[in-house]
Image (tube, rainbow, N blue to C red):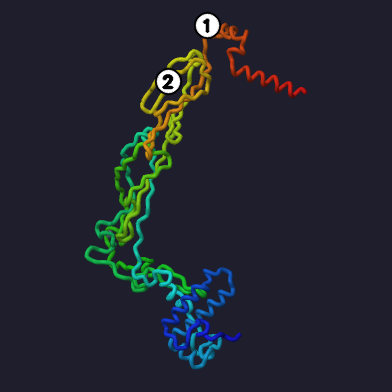
Amino acid sequence: MSKRDYYEVLSVGRESSEREIKKAYKRLAMKFHPDRNPDDKTAEAKFKEIKEAYEILTDSDKKAAYDQFGHAGVDPNRGGGGFGGNADFGDVFGDVFGDIFGGGRRGGQRQAARGSDLRYNLELSLEEAVKGLTKELRIPKLTTCDSCDGSGAKKGTSPTTCGTCHGQGQVQMRQGFFAVQQACPTCHGRGKIIKDPCNKCHGEGRVEKSKTLSVKIPAGVDNGDRIRLSGEGEAGEYGAPPGDLYVQVSVREHSIFVRDGNNLYCEVPISFGKATLGGGIEVPTLDGKVNLKIPAETQTGRMFRMRGKGVKSVRSHAVGDLLCKVVMETPVKLNERQKDLLREFDETLSDASKKHSPKAEGFFDGVKKFFQDLNT
Ligand SMILES: [Zn+2]
Ligand SMILES: [Zn+2]
């Protein structure tokens, strides 16, 4: 296979400077980079060709050999040429792309990582969530070591820049065609070496410690709400800023109320007599009992809305309602006299039961029709 002229490959003149060659290479390499052309064999071949041309033309010895002897002077397949037997495309790649993509390879010292965010699960009763409160939370976390102020180095000393990675925390390893970044094996990615570690934190810069925080929980918080405490997370590496603490609220189930947004819902049992004759019943609210007037002939399951007796929203300050469902109870453990009275009462209904039982009327008509339809 005959090779194209390297200058032609990069579309540059023979008198081009190294800077111009580099510039041309960047432009073409960006265009044909395999990451931008997945599964495109033509682009891949082009990319290799561009790289090879660049590698030769930016190496003064190889360039001189190429200029004098052409491909014969540098052809890696010829072997005997003594040039470029193992052209290191990986390094070329990293060298140029490092600054195109701001890859940090030349960006000086590696930055220590910000501390992790922490999450604290806080379980509240419904009353606490609705009314709000101040809670003392004891949080075990990594805090900045006060003996070395987070540097990890013994008092009076300071960490030194790692000689292997020159403070970058990463080194390049070749892997086939490409170069990959790996954590520096000498400093484990820190970029710094601590020769004399701090006695208290053993060079970590952070120590595990419990901190008690007083957290104000606003009135109206609900299940799943999150309160962010800025800077109360874990300390950062070697004095880097701390993370945040997120207090995740969960609300325990209540024995009487179910919350739905800003509304509260409850069921209140009433007697057959009260449902029939009407009257006042006591209804629980989060602020104590209130009286609710039930009209005569109230059917079981009827819902009563008590405005403003729900929950005040933590966001809008709108106040929800209390929804009370009255449920009629069948009396139990009756004595003989009570049973007799009921039988007597029940007989008074049987003459014209339909008039006294609005539901039954519709229901029995429906049943009758159901069986008639079955028989036809
Ligand atoms: Zn320390
Ligand atoms: Zn290192």
Q: On residue 292, which mark appears? A: 2
Residue 216 higher or lower than 263, as above or below: below
Residue 331 is left or right of residue 287, and the answer is: right
Q: Is residue 283 left or right of residue 239?
A: right
**Quadrant where the N terminus is found in the figure:** bottom right
Residue 184 visible from this viewpoint: no
The x and y percentages for residue 196 are 27, 66
Mark 2 and 1 residues: CB-CB less than 8 Å, in contact? Answer: no
**Which amino acid type is marked by label 1?**
Arg
Percent x, y of residue 345: 56, 8
Determine the residue positioned at 39% across, 26% down: 285
Q: Earlier in the sequence, mark 2 or mark 1?
A: 2
x, y percent for residue 190 = 35, 66
* Quarter-of-image position of residue 130: top left
Element assignment for label 1: helix
Residue visible at 42% across and 83% down?
18
